[in-house]
Image (tube, rainbow, N blue to C red):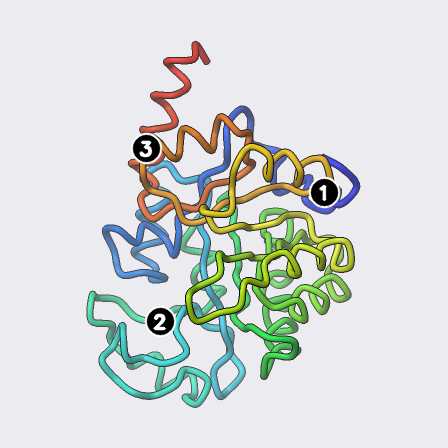
């Protein structure tokens, strides 16, 4: 790794050969995403850690939830940011479970799990970004989890604020393939990397090939790919030398990578 990676040394220090496996919103193929049950199951299934999403609610607590509103997971129209934490705590998700705080999620993963915290938000200045970054930093510091946390976001502003507040805790820039309704701006996003100086780039799987992974590594960035479940693709990405893979099915991913290691004599 190059100079960009120095802040992330502790995040990767306990891992050896092969990519780190992070469970996407926990073991979300089996449990309701971003719930304590999903995080606990992910660790029981052999994940090195989890990837989770955070946003702020109306009373300022940092909660773990992906969507802006409750419609998909709770069948309700309210926006998360508009509800106080007491009201969110009463919400029962359709697949089971409730909305946890970031502190509860970190605790549920156990004392040595890696935690990739995605700060929700997009655009140049997402609403509430500064307060959310401050809230995440407070929780991470209070729980003594800085050594095992990596913060990621699609928002350049979130990463810029995070680097100013906690330069010792690594961060990663999320990058997605352009959708039909979007302009193909990934090349422009990649140009932000030298300005933001994150520890890692977090590309969507479709952006990854041997040349791209090699280029990012040459420039000093760790490469953590999302979201990958197919055994053949997991094995291919491992062969490319990616540093981390985010998966919905940590047990299946662990089995696929173990098979690769055995076949390669590792």
Image position of 5 (left or right of 86): right
Q: Residue furthest top?
A: 265
Q: Earlier in the sequence, mark 3 or mark 1?
A: 1
Observer-side mark, 3 or 1, equals: 3
Q: CA distance from mark 2 to mark 3?
A: 31 Å
Secondary element at image label 2:
loop
Instruction: Using the image, tell me which numbered label, if any, was put on residue 148.
Output: none
Q: Is residue 34 above or below residue 131?
A: above
Residue 143 can be seen in this image = no
The residue under label 2 is 99
Q: Is residue 4 above or below residue 133?
A: above
Secondary element at image label 1:
helix
| Quadrant of the frame with the N terminus | top right
Q: Name the residue nearer the viewer: 136 or 220.
A: 220
Observer-side mark, 2 or 1, equals: 1
Q: CA distance from mark 3 to mark 1?
A: 28 Å
> What residue lies at 43% left-to-right and 9% top-to-bottom?
265
Q: Position of residue 33 (x, y in %)?
A: 32, 60
> What residue lies at 38% left-to-right and 35% top-to-bottom?
233
Q: Position of residue 105 (x, y in %)?
A: 43, 60
> What residue lies at 31% left-to-right and 38% top-to-bottom?
230
Q: Name the residue nearer the viewer: 198 or 138.
A: 198
The residue under label 3 is 231
């Amino acid at each position: 790794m190059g100079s960009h990676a120095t802040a992330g040394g502790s995040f990767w220090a306990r891992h050896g050969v092969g990519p780190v496996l992070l469970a996407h919103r926990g073991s979300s193929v089996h449990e309701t995403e971003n719930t304590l049950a999903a995080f606990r199951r992910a660790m029981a299934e052999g994940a090195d850690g989890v990837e989770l999403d955070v946003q702020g609610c109306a009373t300022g607590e940092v909660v773990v939830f992906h969507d802006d509103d409750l419609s998909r997971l709770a069948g309700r129209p309210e926006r998360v940011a508009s509800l106080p934490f007491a009201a969110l705590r009463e919400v029962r998700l359709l697949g089971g479970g409730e909305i946890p705080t970031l502190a509860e999620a970190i605790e549920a993963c156990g004392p040595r799990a890696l935690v990739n915290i995605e700060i929700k938000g997009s655009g140049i200045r997402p609403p509430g970004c500064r307060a959310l970054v401050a809230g995440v930093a407070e929780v991470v510091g209070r729980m003594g989890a800085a050594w095992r946390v990596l913060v990621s976001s699609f928002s350049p502003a979130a990463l810029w604020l995070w680097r100013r507040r906690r330069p010792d805790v690594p961060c990663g820039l999320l990058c997605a393939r352009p959708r039909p309704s979007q302009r193909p701006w990934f090349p422009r996003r990649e140009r932000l990397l030298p300005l933001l100086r994150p520890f890692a780039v977090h590309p969507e799987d479709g952006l990854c090939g041997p040349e791209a992974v090699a280029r990012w590594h040459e420039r000093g960035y760790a490469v953590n790919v999302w979201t990958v479940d197919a055994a053949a693709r997991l094995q291919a990405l491992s062969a490319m030398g990616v540093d981390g893979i985010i998966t919905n099915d940590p047990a299946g991913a662990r089995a696929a990578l173990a098979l690769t290691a055995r076949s390669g004599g590792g």
